[in-house]
Image (cartoon, helix red, strand yellow):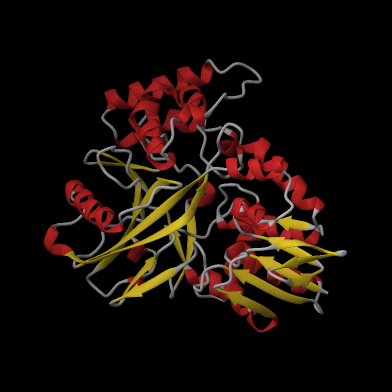
Amino acid sequence: MRVAVLGFGWAGVLAAGFLLERYPGAEVVAFEKSRRLGGLLSTAEINSFTFDIGGSHVIFSNDKAVLAEVVALLGGEALEHQRKAYVRLGDLFVPYPFENGLYVLPPEERAQLIGDLVEALMKIPPGWRPKHLLDWIETTFGNGIARRYLIPYNEKIWKRPLDQISADWVYMPGRLPVPDVKTLVKTAAGIPTVGYAEQSRFYYPRRGGIQRQYQAALERVRDRVAVRAGEAVKEVGRRGGRLAVNGVEVDLAVAAMPLPDLIAAFSDAPEEVAKAAERLDYNQVVVVGVALDKPAPDQHWIYVPDRRIVFHRYAWISNYSPANAPPGRSALIAEITLPRGVEPDLERLKAEVVEGLLELGVARERDVLHVEAWLHRYGYPLYTLDHAQNRDVVLRWLREQGVAAVGRWGQWHYWNTDKVYKNVKETIAAL
């Protein structure tokens, strides 16, 4: 049996591994448009500084079995951390999740924000479902937290009015923290609490950046998969009873590539399916790496709702592993989203990131040793109001063609790497 894996990022390499476990005698061929393997789990080393060029990714999960399996891939070379993440409000670092960290605010402001939140929770009617993301934020968290943090931050990352974004994705277990009344009482009293517990401790590769997570999965299948790096999927169709991908006949295809590109490769996709795929929206992401001639503060990643600052998050990647920067120096990455179709000026964005870091007091101009930027056309799937409908139309038709779609881009879900792992494993098991 010959199987094609379409897209060979994290989901694709996992699909190859699980396919070979289930069908040891299968011939697996993988198509990947980039010559560089890794997708969003890619890392670059520049002048002894290591940057995760697909953004800040760490290993965590609320599924203990999945977490154990992913960590085991690293063969004992995983560092464990206690999360030190914050929301930046002016000069104040509020521990993340925001509602858990309100104890650091002055009592009057803390009381106002928590009072708004409790009042909002008390007014939620039975069976309520939010109309859109803005409705979810305002109804769940109250006006204060919505205005100070959640609205400006989400507008920065999604680059759309929040009443045009579906709230479906916030209902995914483990996707976002939600308020807990007992926690709020402690926070109001000024007592530190921990929220989003499954992410409060996380793992990260000792060496090689986050790409080591991808490489560990790749090493398990490298000798048994024919990887066509640099070959985009351009043509998919039927030849008799078999699928043909770029002229290669296969018995089964597992797609881990973006759905719009996949449907565009079918010459016979119905108009309804083609239009549904075109309506699946997404944001690009630009990751800017900055090497600094100064040690990093005791922090991991920082959310920045300030609209004057171009990036929505920055991360001290050198605190993820000491191997990511020379002693006494540090490396950080800043993330910027852009709507699809926008051609970014990377040089301008690099300059704006440095300006933002200077404005926030993160670094001084003389600290900056090197700045680099990387663009990923597919960064974040967008949950438009018609997202579920369009996604279902596309996935139903692909199943009819004998194509199993997996992962963030094959399922068009904003999933962390643990959710991708579980989805791929369960999909292959159910084939």
50 or 88: nearer the eye? 50
Can see residue 49? yes
- Which residue shows up at 63% across the image and 63% down it? 234
Q: Is residue 5 left or right of residue 159?
A: right
Q: Position of residue 23 (x, y in %)?
A: 81, 73
| Residue that extends furthest to the left in the rendered view of this protein | 366
Quadrant in which residue 290 is drawn: bottom left
Q: Quadrant of the C terminus?
A: bottom right
Residue 345 drawn above or below residue 207:
above
Residue 258 drawn above or below residue 164:
below
Q: Position of residue 270 (x, y in %)?
A: 74, 45
| Residue that extends furthest to the front in the rendered view of this protein | 267
40 or 324: nearer the eye? 40
- Which residue shows up at 43% across the image and 30% down it? 161
Q: Is residue 233 left or right of residue 348?
A: right
Q: Position of residue 424 (x, y in %)?
A: 69, 59
Residue 306 drawn above or below residue 81:
above
| Residue that extends furthest to the bottom in the rendered view of this protein | 223
Can see residue 78? no
- Which residue shows up at 87% across the image and 64% down it? 241
Q: Quadrant of the N terminus?
A: bottom right
- Which residue shows up at 51% across the image and 21% down it? 121
349 or 364: nearer the eye? 349
Residue 385 drawn above or below residue 209:
above
Number of marks drawn = 0
Q: Position of residue 129 (x, y in %)?
A: 61, 24
Q: Is residue 222 left or right of residue 21?
A: left
